[in-house]
Amino acid sequence: MSVRRLAEEQFQPAAFSFNAENTAWAEATIRKYPAGRQQSAVIPLLMRAQEQEGWVTKAAIEYVGEMLDMPFIRVLEVATFYTQFQLKPIGTRAHIQVCGTTPCMLRGAEDLIHVCKSKIHPEPLHQNADGTLSWEEVECQGACVNAPMVMIFKDAYEDLTTTQLEHIIDRFAAGKGSDIKPGPQVDRVFSAPVGGPVTLTDAIQPIRFSDAPAAAPAAAEASVPPANAAKPVTDAPETDKSLKTPATDKKAAAANTKVKGDSADTARPVKEAVATPVASAPAPAAALDEKNRPAGIERPATPDDLKMISGVGPKIEATLNGLGVYTFEQIAKWKKAEREWVDSYLKFSGRIERDDWVKQAKALAKGGEAEYIKVFGKKPR
Ligand code: FES
């Protein structure tokens, strides 16, 4: 647990007061509580003070204490307990809070901290040169299943690799943090399994109210065209989908429900699953020029485990297999146009480059896990 103290005197402003809008808001907030219980408003008022000033100053703590008729020490206790409150000036564009609790640590939080140290400042809670970025390590943020993760202000970015965090930091540094969609950065919906549900898939189909998670296995099957198919079926990462499944998706899901038949179908080999065409499947978002599609091969007796590549989950692996991509060596040889074709096909918005699949695949093709560790300094996923 980090030690949380007020900023040194030289940073502290002489006074604090809410502006007119926030004063009206604070008074309305206090009135929500019964007489004698106004102190319950301490957290929202401190948060509003932080939003106004950028951080919680000593003067703001005293001001809130006076508004709520609370001893200053009680307000200080709250402000210093919760890491949501910043006690010294932080980055104006992003303050990266890296979760360093056990599940995140086991999944690579230490590497994320190294990224922050190298890209922002060697020390936590220090601004970078132009004052736009800062970072710190915090305790569990309640997204352990999607570890490792970071919080940036009120948004969580989960399932991170070092490459993804570097990209996120770069976007925020450029003032374009809103380009990055918060939440899982892999093909999963919220905290559902990567690639979609893997258990009780038949049981949940009749009662599902949202097609997004339940449609994943069906979509995975639908996304596996024959290697010579002219029009591939879209296999968008789940993070790109809204919970409101579009009508076209519903048709595809319905078609796949028919294809699936009984529960034994969930274990069907991929090749068998593609035998029935999905007439209503949506077309890919981008125009895909077939000449750039990477050459596929017949399924080898022992295909490589493509999931060892960071950014490839079971669903994406099935999609790649459907394109005739089964080995690290194939991916290692992809030219730029081929990478862009696959990226567009998967609606990845550049993730193949950001995660550097080719470098990963080259290492894995050359010497498996040992070579990967040599190149990247860590085990493959
Ligand atoms: S351990 Fe990181 S979110 Fe819980």
Image (cartoon, rainbow, N blue to C red):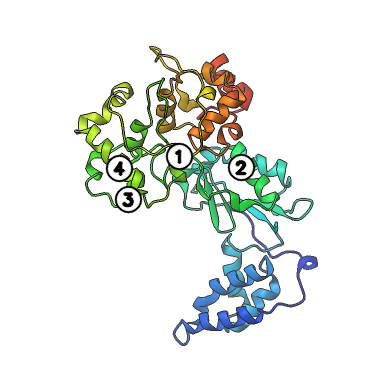
CA–CA distance in space, label 2 to label 1: 19 Å
Q: Which residue is mark 2?
A: 165
Q: Is mark 3 within 8 Å of ligand 1?
A: no
**How far apart are the two marked residues, 4 and 3, measured between alpha carbons?**
14 Å
Q: CA distance from mark 1 to mark 3?
A: 16 Å
Label 1 vs 4, first from the N-terminus: 1
- The earlier-in-sequence mark between 1 and 3 is 3
Q: From the top left corner, tell me how far across and down residue 71 is, in percent.
A: 60, 80
Q: CA distance from mark 3 to mark 2?
A: 30 Å
Give the residue pinned by disc 3. Answer: 210
Q: Secondary structure at mark 4?
A: helix
The residue that label 1 is drawn on is 237
Q: Nearer the viewer, mark 2 or mark 1?
A: 1
Which residue sits at x=28%, y=36%? 256
- Residue drawn at the location 57% of the way across and 30% of the way down: 340
Mark 3 vs mark 2: give the one in front: 3
- Between the C-alphas of marks 1 and 4, the distance is 18 Å
Residue type highlighted by circle 1: Pro
Nearest the viewer among 237 and 373 is 237
**Is the Cβ of the residue at disc 1 closer than 8 Å to that at disc 3?**
no
Say which quarter of the image contains residue 320. top left
What residue is shown at x 55% (from left), y 22% (from top)?
Answer: 361
Q: Secondary structure at mark 2?
A: helix
- The crowd level at tag 1 (other Cα within 10 Å; few <14, some 14-19, many 20+) is many
Left or right: 122 as drawn, with respect to 272: right
